[in-house]
Amino acid sequence: MKKINAFLVLFVLITTATFGQNTFTLTSTDLGGQATKAQEFSGFGCTGNNASPQLSWKNAPDGTKSFAITMYDPDAPTGSGWWHWIVFDIPANVNELVTKAGNISLNLAPKGSIQSITDYGSAGYGGPCPPEGHGLHQYIITVYALKTDSLGLTKDTNAAVVGYYLWNNTLAKASIVAYYQREKQ
């Protein structure tokens, strides 16, 4: 009986240690499984509010020195997807971007962070704007916990170069996915 009890205690401890851990997690109070007109781009035929969603994250791994956020549409008919938002050099003591932080003119992003060029050709947030009738597109928003306090890049750095630096400096990442489509008018 003692062996069975010892086994059960050991099993519970291992299970708790393995499955009960707090993992690096990204959430949003503005965005669920579907993007809305609030997040939709304003331009390219889209008439949304182009408001970047509120994002918050928790349980970053030890050694995190900064964060980065990207928003990517792999379903864009470009052959290489579409980068909608790139923010990096977010200080390690920050765990949230407020709604509309992607609007550079509002100065809501954390001090020291950099928003670089998207595939729209400008810095800051550029919301979903899939072609009419192209069906659902997925928008993957990812937070990266980085092992460096700065990527050493500027607001003019393109998405591919930022991605390369993220790949080389990522300790952990967490994502949320939202879907959006435009019907034919």
Image (cartoon, rainbow, N blue to C red):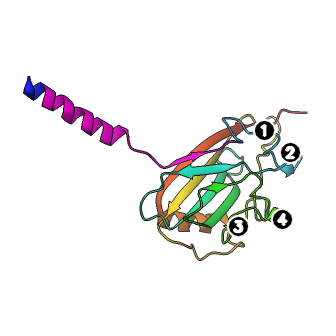
Residue placed under numbered mark 3 in the picture: 116
Residue 87 falls within the magenta-colored stretch: no
Residue beneath label 1, please?
36
Residue behind mark 2: 48
Residue at image point 80% right, 42% down: 131
Q: Distance between the residues labelled 3 and 1?
A: 24 Å
Residue type, label 2: Gly
Q: Is residue 21 left or right of residue 52?
A: left
List the residue tagged with mark 4. 105
View extreme (top): residue: 1
CA–CA distance in space, label 4 to label 2: 18 Å
Q: Is mark 1 on a helix, strand or loop?
A: loop
**Where does residue 115 sit, x and y in percent of width and height?**
70, 66
Q: Which amino acid does label 4 sit on?
A: Ser
Q: Earlier in the sequence, mark 3 or mark 1?
A: 1
Kindly indicate whether the residue at mark 2 contacts the one at mark 4 (C-beta within 8 angstroms): no
Which stretch did the figure color magenta? 5-29
Residue 22 is one of the magenta-drawn residues: yes
Mark 2 nearby-residue class (10 Å; few <14, some 14–19, many ≥20): some
